[in-house]
Image (cartoon, grey):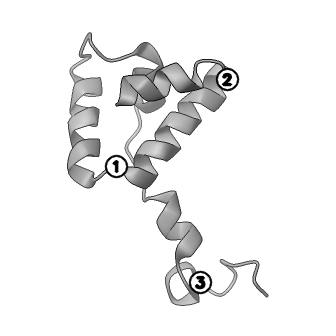
């Protein structure tokens, strides 16, 4: 699936493509899937698209951006929303 994302994002500038892949995986993949992908990156698995590998080279996965966007003030703090 990660390689399919690379195919989609290949038309974007490289840094934007890597960020898009990283954001999608952080948002929608389970922890187990993300850990397996990071293990492939660390082992330099040859079946992994270089764009995907570049998205995670030397990086760890952060918290899902979906959680940040949908969290209430008790989760993101009083200034975490533009709702007023």
Observer-nearest of 50 and 78: 50
Q: Residue at x 59, y 84 (%)?
A: 77
Q: Closest to the observer: 63 or 66?
A: 66
Residue position for label 2? 12
The image shows residue 83 at horizontal and vertical percentages of 75, 83
Along the polypeptide, which appears first: circle 2 or circle 3? 2
Q: Secondary structure at mark 1?
A: loop
Q: Nearer the viewer, mark 2 or mark 3?
A: 2
Quick one: label 1, few (<14), some, or many (20+) residues within 10 Å?
few
Give the quarter of the figure containing the C terminus. bottom right
Which one is nearer the viewer's eye here, 12 or 8? Answer: 8
Relative vertical location of residue 30 with respect to residue 43 in this rendering, above or below:
below
- Determine contact: label 3, label 1, CB under 8 Å: no
Mark closest to the chain's N terminus, 1 or 2: 2
Q: Residue furthest right?
A: 84
Query: Which residue position holds label 1?
Result: 29
């Amino acid at each position: 699936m990660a390689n399919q994302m690379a195919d989609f994002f290949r038309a974007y500038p490289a840094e934007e493509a890597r960020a898009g892949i990283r954001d999608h995986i952080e948002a929608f993949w389970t922890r187990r899937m993300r850990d397996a992908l990071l293990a492939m990156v660390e082992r330099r698995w040859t079946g992994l698209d270089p764009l995907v590998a570049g998205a995670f080279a030397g990086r760890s996965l952060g918290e899902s951006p979906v959680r940040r966007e949908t969290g209430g003030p008790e989760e993101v703090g009083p200034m975490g929303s533009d709702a007023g």
